[in-house]
Image (cartoon, helix red, strand yellow):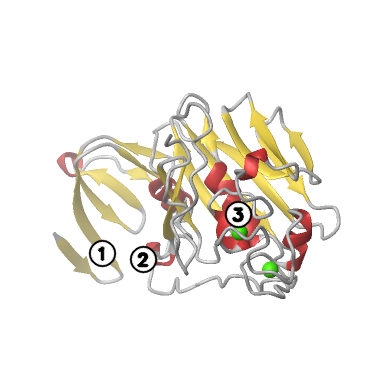
Amino acid sequence: MYTATEGTFQIGFALEEGTAWGVTVLPKGKYLANPTAIIPESSANGPVAPTSTPTTQPATPENQTENPKPPTIGLDSDNDGLTDVEESLYHAVSTKVDSDGDGYKDGEELIAGYDPADKIKRIWQATTTAVYRNQAYGYSFIYPKPWVAKSIDDGKETLFTDSNTNEFFDVLVQDNPLGLSAINWYLRQNPNVNPNLLTTVTVANLPATQTADGLVTYVSSGSKLFIISYNVGVGKEANFFATYKMLLKTWQFSGTTTSAPAAEKPTPSSTPDQTNSSSTSES
Ligand SMILES: [Ca+2]
Ligand SMILES: [Ca+2]
């Protein structure tokens, strides 16, 4: 239903299950929405429930066309998907597409969770990496061993910094009491963003939401929402895009996985898996 009068509008909609609008929790039911409020249809003439930011939400999202571009990737001399900085970090060879001679490109291997400098090892078995485990919030992943990990706020946020470039990864845990999916949580926080600009990737076998620049990933698990971001720095080149994808690939929630998977190689492909879609928990 849509009705309009001078200077305003009203839209009717029905919720098949409960959700939230700003700070307002909406149970299952039928509603009427106008630029300043959402009200149950059954009480359309009664008191209104104000929305959280009625004066700043535009009536239409058409003007939200921001489409953040991925940053410029740092020098990749052999064009194998690992920057020269990453080649050094993982003890690969910056002039060899396939450093360990196993038939798979260096970048393809790292993104799939394999050691680009060893024919057999997975990346978590490499001497160049370490595992980070956050006991407070029940997650873990693999990161470059030389990086400095620093937790703040009792583990609610942790930074992983490369001291040479000052690029860093940031994992921030937010409350998600309604258990919203990643996409719904994101759109609730960023109501003006066009959902078509977001992409869906897989993290720990869960659908995750990623911004168009590929730098921020949102994962929902239980009553928590995990924001995993890659901070390149304004105007700088990104040297660790493959490493960021490796982090997402190796991310695990406690209790959702068992032992390390068998050491099968990634399926041969000229286009490395950008969606981290294959499981790390299969054996
Ligand atoms: Ca390279
Ligand atoms: Ca290889």
The Cα atoms of the two marked residues, 3 and 1, are separated by: 52 Å
How crowded pointer 2 is (Cα within 10 Å; few <14, some 14-19, many 20+) is rated as some
Secondary element under disc 2, as helix, strand or loop, is: loop
- Relative to 210, say whether 69 is above or below: below
> Callout 1, which amino acid?
Phe
Secondary element under disc 1, as helix, strand or loop, is: strand
> Callout 3, which amino acid?
Leu
- Residue with the mark numbered 1: 9
Could you tell me residue 229's position as x and y percent?
62, 52
Q: Nearer the viewer, mark 2 or mark 3?
A: 3
User: Which mark, residue 110?
Assistant: 3
Q: Kindly indicate whether the residue at mark 2 contacts the one at mark 1 (C-beta within 8 angstroms).
A: yes
Secondary element under disc 3, as helix, strand or loop, is: helix
Indicate which disc, 2 or 3, sits on the residue closer to the N terminus. 2
Could you tell me residue 36's position as x and y percent?
36, 54
At 63% across and 24% down in the image, what residue appears?
Answer: 135
Q: Nearer the viewer, mark 1 or mark 2?
A: 2
